[in-house]
Image (spheres, rainbow, N blue to C red):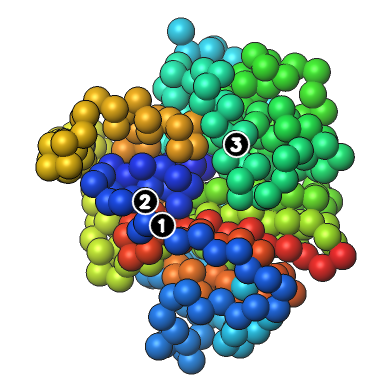
Amino acid sequence: MRDAKASPPGRDSSRSNGYFLGRQDNDVQSHDVDDGQEFTEMSTQDARRSVVPRRVTSARERAKNGYVQSHDVQQNKPVVDMCATQAPVQDREQGYEPEGLGPAADAGERFAFGKNWRAFLSVLNDERIAVAEESLRGMLEMDSLAGRSWLDIGSGSGLFSLAAARLGASPIHSFDYDPDSVACTRELKRRYQPAAAWTIERGSALDGGYLESLGRFDIVYAWGVLHHTGNLWRALELVRRRVKPGGRLFIAIYNDQGLISRAWTLVKRTYNRGRLGRMLMTGCFVPYFAGRGLASDLIHLRNPAARYRQYQKQRGMSVVHDWRDWLGGYPFEVARPDEVVRFCQARGLTAVKVKTCGRSLGNNEFVFAKPA
């Protein structure tokens, strides 16, 4: 489903996934966190309240999906389109339907992430793959993944599973709820790593039984995925259990910007209501994203075309496909960095690296370690 590893509109995707067009690199804050160090980068003025998922789906949707209402978290505890022609997705059992996800949004409101990834494969090249590899090295602070198992939750296009394979990870297990995303991941394996110990199938981050059956992994990767499940905190709870002792959990979750996030929820729901909604939101916001970047480049005397050439160097992604993913990415939830860190720390994980996008829209990135 992956948000695609997608950046919010008009941002340069540095896996903090981007600052708005025109923002400077110093808006993104990266933290190397020592074991036991408290996470205080963001304001904690309401830290006394329990961590509550941001309201981005209707009450009926939350009830239908067993939406977690709150968590008792103690403060500051030690923070040509080839895949379209593939055979239908075959799951581990014929007729398998992932449990626990279901229609987290009203009928017709869930964004077709896989179709967007099919289009992305048409622009994927060796340079983008190399950039994806480098982004993994940077956040995980590992030059090689040799000897480490890899679980990709919501694999999307399959780009980062491919990057992990090229860095030596084995075995690899990739799954996605969207059948088109599963097909795209399989196509990347066919093109680049046909002999790899790489399993690809359909599954849900909210299907506890399915996740339990996978076992545990050295690196569990869920970048820009959990906030699209319709039940962010339940998904995070289930996913963190898949990390082996001594392993790493690498996640990215949309930053909570209060009323701005609520407004984007309305945009995304409108986009997914039908063709008219897609045309309206695309017609309004794509010119805005492009125009904002153009204005910033002209003001700072930069070449406007360079912005688009350089975009893929952030994480290997495509700006146009990321715009589409941002506008349509629904269900949609958000969380503050301190909430995510407290949640994981209360469950025995230690934050070893946190990369935030400041006060802007985008993904905050986290690498957590599980004690050996």
Residue type, mark 2 in image:
Asp
Q: Residue furthest top?
A: 80
Q: Identify the mark nearer the N-term, 1 or 3.
A: 1
Q: Identify the mark nearer the N-term, 3 or 2.
A: 2
Residue topped by disc 2? 25
Q: Are marks 3 and 2 in contact (CB under 8 Å)?
A: no
Q: Give how far across and how far down residue 198 sits, in percent.
A: 77, 30
Q: Are marks 2 and 1 in contact (CB under 8 Å)?
A: yes
Residue type, mark 3 in image:
Glu
Residue at position x 85%, y 62% from top?
245
Assign a secondary structure to mark 1. loop
Residue topped by disc 1? 28
Q: Give how far across and how far down residue 19 sits, in percent.
A: 34, 50
Which quadrant of the structure image shows residue 160?
top right
Q: If the image is split into quadrants, where does the C terminus sit?
A: bottom right
Assign a secondary structure to mark 2. helix
Residue topped by disc 3? 134
> Label 3: few (<14), some or many (≥20) within 10 Å?
many
Residue in front for this viewpoint, 338 or 171: 338
Camera sees residue 207: no
